[in-house]
Amino acid sequence: MDGRTAFAWILVAVLAVITWLLVQPFLSWLLATGLLAFVCFPLHRRLEDRIGPRLSAGLLSVLVVLVVVVPLALGVNAALEQGTALLEGVSRARILRQLENFLGRYAGISVPVQSYAQQGVERLGDYVSGRASTILSAGLHAFIGFLLLVFVFYYLLKDGHLFVRWLREMTPLEPAVRDELFTSVNHMVWAVLKGHVLVAIVQGLVAGVSLFLTGVPEAPLLTLAMMFLAIVPVIGVAPVLGGAVVYLFSTGQVLSAAFVVVWGMTSVAVTDDYLRALIIDRESEMHSAVIFVGVVGGTYLLGAMGLFVGPILIGLFKTCVEVVGGYYGVVHRS
């Protein structure tokens, strides 16, 4: 390698590091933008033939704000309000009084549970007040990330085909290998997204039916929360349904609590097992254990977006190994 070639590669490496430092603070937002653009791109291709690429990308950007971002923001705000109200009224909760009576009657000890709960609420309030600057900084970061999402989403739809073409040109593989690799990657991402996200939405909705039927407070908000929790294998909707059972039992609605338990063990479980096996196992050929590793590892590495990106990255690795290894004789192609 001569001096000019070495200098060129050093320059590329330095600029790559600088680019990473610029992107890293908003990596989660950019990953979310990429996934949204990937999902909406087929619709954009249909609309741009009728109304043009600029107007189509603009309308879909507004649609994403209205359908995804606004409900999410309202849900977070409602969750904060309900959480605050719950913490303020926890010392008056019936279940705490029942716990005090139970300990006094059967254990022979007197534990001021309500007093401890009130102290916990006060300490939590002091903690939040002391970290006001950190919370404000996080809010500013989220606002900038939101603006970045909308801006980049628009241009990914409008000029995304140019970016894909550039990736194809920069991929140093034979044309046949490159084409199959891109096709397989596209299929894998769709399979994981449909299996991972669609199953979570359906499971959350099915689980939410039991909350509506039994009259659990804030059933719409809890159903939305279960849609997100259902993305996490093993854990799933159990925390919310378990909390609903405790609430119904503590308020004397024993039959309703039993109904939620039976509904969760039958309808919710069957929906999860059937759809996950039908979509993920059949289309992406990824085992549920691999999905779980992707979710946990992705969350640890990338935060909330890792729930979606983790399984996709593992799926991409599997696809690349099969395509590249098959063409170059490393993997036997059946």
Image (cartoon, grey):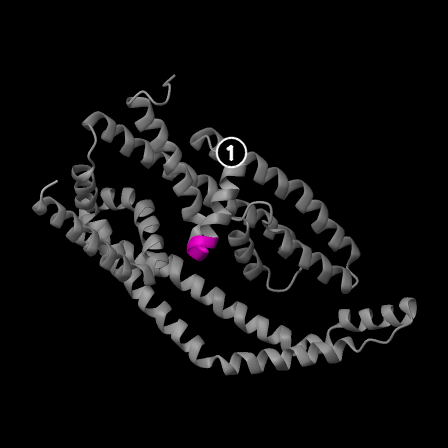
Give yes or no for residue 223 being in the magenta stretch: no
Whether residue 293 can be seen here: yes
Q: Is 209 left or right of 138, judged from the image as shown?
A: right
Q: Amino acid at mark 1?
A: His
Q: Position of residue 302 (x, y in %)?
A: 42, 55
> Residue at coordinates 65% horizontally, 54% vertically from top-left?
241
The C terminus - image quarter: top left
Q: Is 245 left or right of 136, judged from the image as shown?
A: right
Q: Position of residue 94 (x, y in %)?
A: 76, 72
> Residue at coordinates 57% horizontally, 40% vertically from top-left?
272
Q: Is 65 left or right of 243, judged from the image as shown?
A: left
Q: Position of residue 106 (x, y in %)?
A: 91, 66
From this viewpoint, which residue is outermost toward the top?
Answer: 334
Main secondary structure type of the part rendered in magenta: helix
> Which residue is identified by label 1?
287
Q: Position of residue 326 (x, y in %)?
A: 33, 23
SS class, disc 1: loop
Which residues make up the magenta segment?
300-304
Q: Is 201 left or right of 141, judged from the image as shown?
A: right
From this viewpoint, which residue is outermost toward the front?
Answer: 2
For label 1, the crowd category at 10 Å Cα-Cα, with few meaning under 14, some 14 to 19 and many 20 or more, is: few
> Residue at coordinates 57% horizontally, 83% vertically from top-left?
126
Whether residue 214 can be seen here: no
Q: How many marks?
A: 1
Residue 193, quarter of the rendered image: top left
The N terminus - image quarter: top left
Task: Note whether 189 is above or below 136 in the view shown.
Answer: above
Task: Note whether 190 is above or below 248 in the view shown.
Answer: above
